[in-house]
Amino acid sequence: MSEETIVQWLLHNEVQVHPSIKISRSPSGEHIITSTGSIPASTTLLSIPASAIITAASSSLLERIPSLAEKSQWTILILTVMYEASKPDSKWRAYFDSLPTEFDTLMYWTQDELKELEGSAVLNKIGKEEAEAMYLEEIKTFVDSNGEAFGGVDVSLEAFHKAGSWIMAFSSDFEKQGNTRNEDAMDEDDDDDDEYDSLDTDKVLVPFGNLVQIDCDLANCEFLPSGTSISLIATKTIPENTALYTDPGPVPRSDLLRRIGRYPESSAQNDVVEIDSTLLISIAGKNLSDSARDSRIERLVEEELLEDSYDIEADGGIPSEILIVIQTFLVDDETFASYAAEEKFPKAKKDARTRDVVLEIIQKRKEGFMTSREEDISILATSGEVLSRRKKMAVEVRLGEKEILRKMEEVARSWADTTESHSRSAKRQKR
């Protein structure tokens, strides 16, 4: 698709385009948006009217099937995209024709390719089976009961996956305008929300919004909604001949790989490694009886201290919640009973016993990977240029998680040194 075709579509759909930006091609051949002159911060670069944004409200599908409004946001948008993408005369024809039809998201990786990510918790989040169950139970059922409206529409599983991949990669979530819901009600209702559906945001596709690249460090603009449009606003002064970037947010590379099929290198700063609570409990509570362990688990769950898993961020810092959980399993029965009676929990100690538990957790977590940190460094150093795109990303993601485990280990090992140092200092003061 030519740059002129994209510009014509934007102008035809009343998108306001700042005169100091243009659509050009990146060195890799992708369409991007760049500045043609210096642009001050707070400048509106694009203003896209609501009528040009892909939502149920701007599509004729909702008019034909009013009951669509009763569905979840994810279901509404995916049905709308499937419907519009099949219409030769859709107002978004040019946009759909510009979108990829092949994807690097984990949904499309082979089993051999996914094996390269063994050890990463992202493998448990791909959701392909859940998506296909949704297709059969919700999408296909709705389409079959409204067959007349979907005449001529590609409603195959392949079309469903393609529409879902577009939405995962390119949709935006904007806070609903005029949201005045009661905070307590919000907390209660949001318990049922999933990754794809929030009661407090609208999920939309902004046509050609994907021409704005993503990068945590290079971000220089952001999309902001209003009642009648979505605008792209400069967040800082943008020099001449500079590509436009938005911040993808604090999302790990593993999750961007799952959702988008790519990631900027700057997102390495947002990497996490997950510590599963079952691993934590099995090591911290290994000397307890089943009943003693279960009573402590029940108490931690009641106080919302026990999560399914815990994120260790890029600096390797260990959350106090993990330390409290470990201490809860390390104290003897009498001490635990006294804590329970007083409705308290042990403090988040950084002592030698806690260190040893954490180090054992780290070792077990490392054993989940097929390769060591050193092997991954060697693979990227000696074979980086000949690796397939997917394998290279897999090695980078798993190496990033191993780097966090290394930093986590350094943090834990420092505790004993600190404790012993303080102990020796106290003894010298007494003498």
Image (cartoon, rainbow, N blue to C red):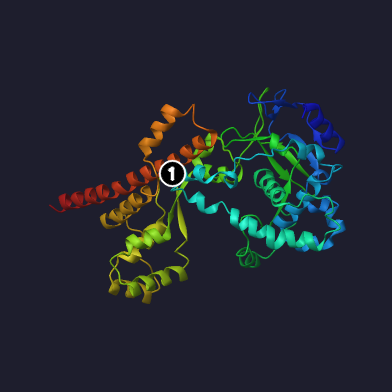
Residue 336: name its quadrant: bottom left
> Residue at position x 17%, y 51% from top?
429
Say if 341 sits above or below 274 in the image. Answer: below
Q: Quadrant of residue 343?
A: bottom left
Q: Residue at x 33, y 44 (%)?
A: 410
Q: Secondary structure at mark 1?
A: helix
Residue lying farthest to the left in this orientation: 431
Total labels drawn: 1
- Image coordinates of residue 360 in percent, x first then y, are 31, 53
Between residue 298 and residue 220, name the one nearer to us: 298
From the viewer's side, name the closer residue of 268 and 142: 142
Q: Which residue is mark 1?
A: 401
Image position of 297 (left or right of 270): left
The residue sitting at 69% across, 30% down in the picture is 32
Residue at left offset 65%, top offset 55%: 196
Q: Residue furthest bottom?
A: 341
> On the picture, is 200 further left or further right than 384?
right
Q: Mark 1 is on which residue type?
A: Glu
Front-most of residues 304 and 310: 310
With 344 as the anchor, is 42 left or right in this view?
Answer: right
Q: Is residue 148 visible?
A: yes
